[in-house]
Amino acid sequence: MARTRNKTIITCAVTGAIHTPTMSDALPYTYDDIASQAIEAAEAGASILHLHARNNETGAPSVDPNDFAPFLPRIKQASDAVINISTGGSLTLSIQDRIRPAATFSAEMCSMNMGSMNFSFHPLAKRYDDWKFDWEKDYVANSDGNIFRNTFRDIREAAETLAPHDIKFEHECYDVGHLYNLKFCMDTGLFKAPVFIQFVMGILGGIGADIDNLVFMKKTADKLFGDAYRWSVLAAGNVQIPLATTASQMGGNVRVGLEDSLFISRGQLADSNAQQVAKIRRIVEELGSEVATPDEAREILDLKGGDRVAF
Ligand code: KMH
Ligand code: ZN
């Protein structure tokens, strides 16, 4: 176990709900493209696939389980990777709507967002004149009015609804206060140690993506959780790979994928999710660490197993 615990888990977040089809031709949104990019990302070294769904025709973010059903079994048949279903899916919908896909498919993992916040990507709207689909411009421009609601009551409702499914949570912490929210929830018995924390950095509304802040998040988590947590870093935009590299050198795990950044290097769009996974894998390995297989990720995070999902 000690050897396994030192391995680096790569999560790939394949499509998300921030970026829109206009922003990159590589962003998958059809059922076929989500399935094939997820499978390729797993082949490149991702042991966890963090998945959102989109409308198959327009690419609009969707939390309808019917939009997950066409690709989940295909990914499972072709890959052993852990499937992690988003519960943040559509930023402005209710928690009841957002947790339905994870509950319906009883995934091994799902996200759990640990606080309410502004969550905006409206500055991106200025970069594009011609949009592929009608919904995109308003969706992006109006995100300056978003409140991403994750109250303590919402978190409790999500945790209690999902508890019978024995799902492990990816606790998305967008700022230091969210770590304290998680600590409070653990103290009230809502989440069992060891928890898996995703330090989310660089979202407009959350903590900035730099090394000082990463060290501060890590130190705060050490203080609050001691040994009772595992952690990973997701940095939005151009700093995705640099901060993932730093995290891996600090003993953490990493998340890449087109949900969080459309780039492969500064200013250059990535061709695919797999390209980002292959890059961070190469860096992690060249710097002397080993990448965890899906079964090693299951052992490290104490997951229920791919045979206990409902798809
Ligand atoms: N898009 C990320 C910044 C979720 O899916 O629950 C956060 C995220 C939320 O992954
Ligand atoms: Zn997500």
Image (cartoon, rainbow, N blue to C red):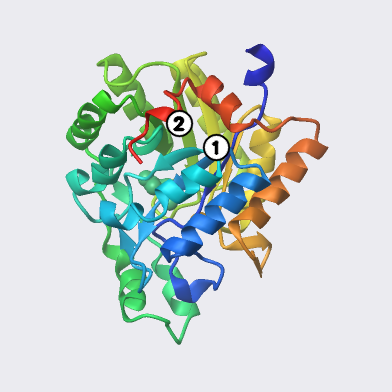
User: Ligand 2: does it lie within 8 Å of the C-beta at label 1?
Assistant: no
Q: Which residue is mark 1?
A: 80
At horizontal 54% and vertical 38% (from top left) the residue drawn is 81
At horizontal 45% and vertical 78% (from top left) the residue drawn is 126
**Residue 150 picture quarter:** top left
Q: Please, what is the three-letter code of the amino acid marked with disc 2?
A: Gly
Confirm whether residue 242 shows in the render: no
In the image, taking residue 9 as reference, residue 157 lies left or right, namely: left
Q: Secondary structure at mark 1?
A: loop
In the image, taking residue 110 as reference, residue 11 lies left or right, namely: right
Q: Which residue is mark 2?
A: 306
**Residue 180 picture quarter:** top left
Q: Position of residue 256 (x, y in %)?
A: 58, 48
- 44 lies above or below 115: below
Q: Position of residue 232 (x, y in %)?
A: 55, 34
Q: Looking at the image, how many numbered discs can be counted on the residues?
A: 2
N-terminal of the pair, mark 1 or mark 2, is: 1
In the image, taking residue 206 as reference, residue 276 lies left or right, namely: right
- 81 lies above or below 186: below
**Residue 17 picture quarter:** bottom left
Instruction: Identify which residue, 74 or 258, lies in the foreground.
Output: 74
Residue projecting furthest to the front: 77
Instruction: Identify which residue, 208 or 4, lies in the foreground.
Output: 4
Q: Please, what is the three-letter code of the amino acid marked with disc 1?
A: Asp
Evaluate if marks 1 and 2 touch, with contact meaning CB atoms under 8 Å apart.
yes
